[in-house]
Amino acid sequence: MQPVKRRIDRPVIVEGKYDKIKIASCFDALVITTDGFGIFKNKEKRELIKAVSAERGVIICTDSDGAGGVIRSHLNGLVPPDRIVNVYIPRIKGKEKRKTRPSAEGYLGVEGVDSETLYKVFAPFFDGAERTGEKMTAADLYELGLCGRENSEKRRRALCVRLGLPPLSSKAFADAAGYLYTKEEIAAESEKITEDDI
């Protein structure tokens, strides 16, 4: 028996049609594609994204590779920061079933990630709820050694690996962490990082 799809009120923006199919198979949500880099030339699509973000805000979920980062960055410049939630799929080595070879960087995209992982990533937004969490501040990150200190970037990357996130800048980490983890959870995982990890 097919599980009941959880509803997500905010539109979800993904890169391509196979990502859209994957998200739609898991959730009851409006899913909009960027058509990969097509978003840079498609004025109508950009206007659509701006319009829907003004009404309810949007969730951006691109692949955790360089191309996904470029598309995410473009979208973050297109939509006001208070209308965007960035969610991140973990970096998992592998190849999508429909492809003959892995992507250039060798990571699974949104379409290749298992449903359980997607449920975890999107759980804060189910059925009209939105866990806002406690925003991490620059002072919090500094205290944990995740910015502004020697090896901060390496520690933050190691923590991202522990938390199942792609490598994130300190700002992106602070924005994303509050949706998925409490400050206590982040601090506890940060303490487990060893010299071998960095």
Image (cartoon, rainbow, N blue to C red):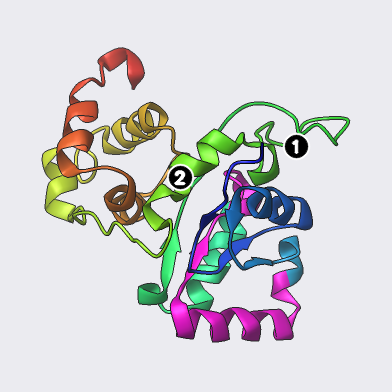
Q: Amino acid at mark 1?
A: Ser
For the point 41% across and 75% down, the residue is: 83
Do callouts 2 and 1 mark residues in contact (Cβ within 8 Å)?
Answer: no
The answer to whether residue 58 is left or right of residue 103 is left
In 3D space, how far apart are the residues under numbered discs 2 and 1 (Cα atoms)?
22 Å
Does 5 sit above or below residue 195? below
Q: Which residue is mark 1?
A: 103
The residue under the point 76% across, 51% down is 18
Amino acid type of the residue tagged 2 in the rendering: Val
The answer to whether residue 130 is above or below residue 68 is below
- 35 vs 106, nearest the viewer: 35
Res 46 → quadrant: bottom right
Among the 4 quarters of the image, the one containing residue 94: top right
Q: Residue 13 appears at what percent x and percent y?
A: 60, 64
> In the rendered structure, which disc, 2 or 1, sits on the residue that comes first in sequence?
1
Q: Main secondary structure of the magenta part?
A: helix
Q: Which residue is mark 2?
A: 121
Which region of the structure is painted magenta? 39-68
